[in-house]
Structures are given as C-alpha cells and as structure tokens.
Image (cartoon, rainbow, N blue to C red):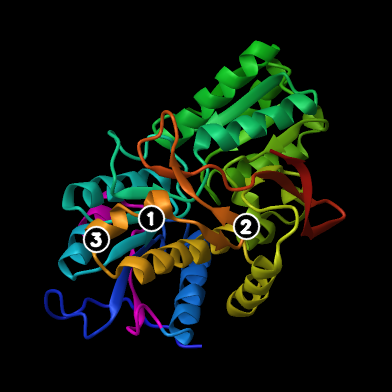
Amino acid sequence: MTVMVTQEPLPGRDETNGHVRIGALAPLTRPGWDEAGRHLLAGMELAVGEVNDAGGILGRPLELVVRDTAADPDRAAAAVEELAGLGVAALAGEYHSVVARAAAARADALGVPFLCASAVLDALTEQPTPWVARLAPAQSHGWRIYGDFLLAQGHRRIAVAADPSSVYWACGTRILRDHLAPHGGTVVELDVRESTAASVCDTLVDRQATALLLLVGHPEPAVPIVRSVRRDPRLAGIMIGAPAGQPEFTGWATSLGADGAAVPFLRYLPEHLGPLGARVATALRERLAEAPSFVAFEGYDTVAVLADVLRSHGPDRAWTAESWASVPVEGTRGRIRFSRTPGIGVWQWAWAPVQVVDRDPAEPGRLRVLHTG
C-alpha cells in the first residue's frame, strides 16, 4: 500500500510534481488533543494509500500535506493560507471545533474546499458557504441524543463542570439545558476556573446532583475531578459523563484505570460495521496498534469522499465545492450524502450514526453501547 504524506514545508508555489494534494489539518502536539489527531491522521493516511493503490486520481498520485494545528485557531488559519498557496485541491480534517471554525473561515475566504472530519460546533461558519462540508454530526444533534440518554436513566438534576470561556463547552451546556428543561431537568454549572476537585464534590452534594458531566479537557482538569468524585463516599451513586468523548481514547483508561470506567460518552459509529467498515477497522488497528476510535473512521471517510469528488471532476476547487450536493459515497459508517440542514451554514451529512457508550467496569478495555440515536 503506497501512502504519500508530507509534513515539512514544500518548495515553490503550486509545485505539485504531478500529484493531487489534499491539505490535512490535525492536532498532533499539545495542547491539542494529540491522541485524537493521531487517529484522525491514521484514517486519512490509510485512505490515501488505498486510493493510490487503485490508480490515484485520474492516474495521478494523491498526497497528504499535513499541518499540525496544536488546537490553535490562529495556527490553523495560517496553515490554510499556506496550503492554499501550495495549490492543494482541498482541505481535510481537524478535530477541535474552535480550530475548525477558524480553518473554515479562512477556507471560505480563499475559495478552497474544506471537508471537516470531526468538529461538531453547529456554527462552523458565520454565514452559509458553498466551500465547506462536514461529516461529523452537529453538536446540537449529538448532545440532544445524550440528553435523551440522561432522561432515560432517570437523571433530572445535572451538574456540569465546564470552562464557560470555551465556545464549544458553553454551547454544549446550553444545548443540554434547553433539551432537559421541558422534561423537568435542571443544569447546574460549575466553573472549573474557579473550582477545585474538592469544591466540585461539595457542590454536587449540596445540589443533590445525580449526574456530573465533564465539559473539560483531558488530562487536566478531568482526571483529578474524576478521582475525587470516585473517592468521595457521599457521591457513591452519582453518574459521571463525558459527552465530548474523552473516554474513547486509550489515554483516558491509562490515566484513570478503573475510575475511568462507566463514564458514558458520545461515539459516532453504528452498532455493527458493514464489510467496508470491518475491513478498515482491521487495517486501522494494525496501523495504530490499538483499537481505532470513531475519529479514525472519520479521517478515512473524509479522504474517501474527497477522492470520489476529485475522480469525478479533477482537482478543480470550484468543481469540488459545487459537488457536495451530488456526493453519494459508501463510507465506513454508512452511505454519505450532504444536504443543507436548517441552522447550519455548511454542507452537512445528516447524520452519522450516534451512540452513547462507556467502558465496561468489569473489563475497562471493552466498550458497551448504552443508547443509540
């Protein structure tokens, strides 16, 4: 399998050397969620290798030009500017929502097609744009499903430990509050900038919360909060949740061990993979030396969609942007089609499958499906 990946700056402007280039954006170093970035890039690289083994794009090799965003919106915007100048046919990837929003704004301004793999923030762009499409379900869609799970489990008094300065976490809190309120649910916000792990526990007891949702980064401050709650006898019956998906990755299990089990999170996979998904899962496991996360599948599907569009129309940016509506691609998690969805300014796959999953307390390396939407 031939994989073409470039991470160092490339000489010259529009020097494609006969290759069709896709600019790949991913958080590969801290403070970005580098574990998610590694899975995202692994999926993209696997798909590029398969495209090239099948003859490339109209006989030309497909190449990834990788840039590390490190969870920095300014760095992502600069990378888009650079990649546009290098003549990439399209942009792909990014995990962090706020970073993807900066990349999308720059791609829209420069007229470069951008297929966002993983970021879920509803307002990925300020205004509707023909240049940007997205595979991941919008935050409002997935987090309402998580809210349904909470209600089905009998939780009505929900505490949220969050950093309200983050647009992503603030939007998540609002989505949950608005969805739970008509069903008698309440959401208490705990500002992690002004709280210690011990004070979080005290507030949970005072407010008689039955569930604590972690809308925070990993490992800090998620790990100390989880450990404190697990060790507080007053909170023996409380559920800890992490809708953003932190427990999906090995780093969560490594840092928390048994304390990290039974923490429900959102995962964008079907209950059963089809033949393509199963084959890709096996290849990703070999590449990553661990079970692939849903983010790795998002990376694969992103390149698969772009390759299909580029085969149909060639590496013309305007043609690619005009092709989102006509995409019918069989992805690893189902058939992918894009449409205009109310309230969302980008072309959206509506929707990728959504699950609520946790790590089995009896076997933390195994994931249990608790709810589907």
The reply, left or right, for residue 125 in relation to residue 145 is left
Helix, strand, or loop for circle 3?
helix
Residue at point 37% right, 67% down?
312
Amino acid, disc 2? Arg
CA distance for labels 1 and 2: 17 Å
Residue 188 appears anywhere in the view: no
CA distance for labels 3 and 1: 12 Å
Furthest-right residue in this view: 362
x then y, percent, for residue 304: 47, 67
- The numbered dot on residue 317 is 3
Amino acid, disc 3? Arg
Residue at point 43% right, 29% down?
342
Mark 1 Cα-neighbour bin, 10 Å: few <14, some 14–19, many ≥20: many
CA distance for labels 2 and 3: 26 Å
Helix, strand, or loop for circle 1?
strand
Quadrant of the image containing the C terminus? top right
